[in-house]
Image (cartoon, rainbow, N blue to C red):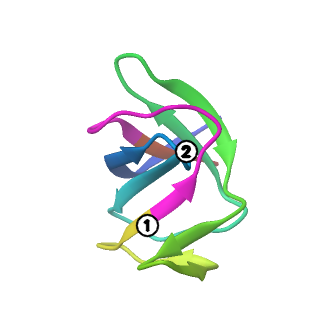
Amino acid sequence: MAEELVGSITHYFAKPEVGVVKLGTEIKTGDVLHFRGSTTDFQQKITSMQVDHAAVESAAAGTEVAIKLKDRVRSHDEVYRVT
C-alpha cells in the first residue's frame, strides 16, 4: 500500500492516550494512518479527533489535531496516510 506523509507527532498524553499531530496536509475521520518512528510502528483508522477541544470531522494543513490512539507515540514520530 502507498503512503503519504501527513505530519508528525508533537506531543503524547499517556492518561487519555491521545497524540497531537502537526499536519502538513488535510486528514479526515475514516482515514487510516500509519504512525512510524524509531520505536513506533502501527496503523490505526481515525475514529475521533479534536482541534482546540472541539470534535471535528476533518482538519486542514497547518493545524494541530488531537487523535485518540491505541498505542504510545513519541515526539517527532512521522504520521502517514495509507492509500
Check whether the beta carbons of the residues at disc 2 and disc 1 lie within 8 A of each other: no
Residue 60 quadrant = bottom left
The span from disc 2 to disc 1 (Cα, nearest Å) is: 14 Å
From the viewer's perspective, is residue 45 above or below residue 65? above
Looking at the rendered structure, the kind of residue marked 2 is Glu
**Of the pair 11 and 40, the residue shown nearer to us:** 11
Q: Is residue 74 magenta?
A: yes
Query: Residue 17 at what x, y percent from top left?
Result: 55, 44
Residue 2 quadrant = top right
Answer few, some or many: residues within 10 Å of disc 2's Cα (few below 14, many 20 plus, some between 14 and 19).
some
Looking at the rendered structure, the kind of residue marked 1 is Val
Q: Main secondary structure of the magenta part?
A: loop
Residue 76 quadrant = top left
Magenta stretch bounds: 66-78
Is label 2 in a helix, a strand or a loop?
loop
**Of the pair 41 and 6, the residue shown nearer to us:** 41
- Give me the residue at 45% from left, 77% from top: 51
Is label 1 in a helix, a strand or a loop?
strand
Dot 2 or dot 1: first in sequence order is: 2
Query: Residue 80 at what x, y percent from top left?
Result: 48, 44
